[in-house]
Image (cartoon, rainbow, N blue to C red):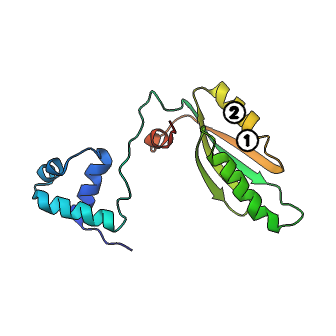
Amino acid sequence: MLQLDDLDRAILRLLKEDARLTISELAERLNRPESTIHFRIKKLLEKGVIERYTIILGEELRPKAVALVYIQAETPIIEDFLEKYIHYIMKTLSILPNVLAVARSGRDGVVALVGEENEEKLERFINETIKVLPTLKKIEVMPLQEFDKGRDLIGFLVRV
């Protein structure tokens, strides 16, 4: 496991809050020379601690209705096909603009985070796009209304 010292963690904290900060601004806030900050950021990038800089989209572009959808696939007669079918479901969901994230859950399950501009459109999207996938055993829709933590994830995951 990669070891980070206090300065590395401080740099990462500041960049998480605002990735637009310049090296000069970081150096000023951390009371360190610019060369030190530049060197540390370069090392964090080389080690893969920082993969890329990105933006979180604002409230205007975020979906207003969000749900977690659990999809359980029916086990095919030839069990070897289950793996391929799970990957098919994941790939199919991944290309849809309303699907914010897709992950495998267990041997025969897929979880998707989906969003739309309102609850009616979200329900229509789930009914017309997800529930029509062939050979599904179970679909559970869990609407998400209130976030204590992670609300920004929705803005990060939105596709434009």
Whether pointer 2 and pointer 1 mark residues with C-beta atoms closer than 8 Å, the reply is yes
The residue carrying mark 1 is: 130
Q: Which quarter shows the N terminus?
A: bottom left
Mark 1 Cα-neighbour bin, 10 Å: few <14, some 14–19, many ≥20: some
Residue 129, picture quadrant: top right
Up the image or down, 136 lies above or below 125; here it is below
Up the image or down, 14 lies above or below 97; here it is below
The residue that appears at 23% across and 45% down in the rendered structure is 21
The residue that appears at 37% across and 54% down in the rendered structure is 52
- The amino acid type of the residue labelled 2 equals Phe
Q: Position of residue 55 (x, y in %)?
A: 38, 42
The residue that appears at 27% across and 44% down in the rendered structure is 20
Up the image or down, 126 lies above or below 74; here it is above
Mark 2 Cα-neighbour bin, 10 Å: few <14, some 14–19, many ≥20: some
Identify the residue at the far right of this view: 77
Task: Please say whether residue 148 is visible from this viewpoint.
Answer: no
Say whether disc 2 or disc 1 marks the residue closer to the N-terminus.
2
Disc marking residue 125: 2
Question: Total of numbered circles in the picture?
Answer: 2
SS at mark 1? helix
The residue that appears at 18% across and 59% down in the rendered structure is 37
| Label 2, label 1: how far apart the Cα atoms are | 7 Å
- The amino acid type of the residue labelled 1 equals Ile
Task: Please say whether residue 74 is visible from this viewpoint.
Answer: yes
Between 5 and 160, the one nearer to me in the picture = 160
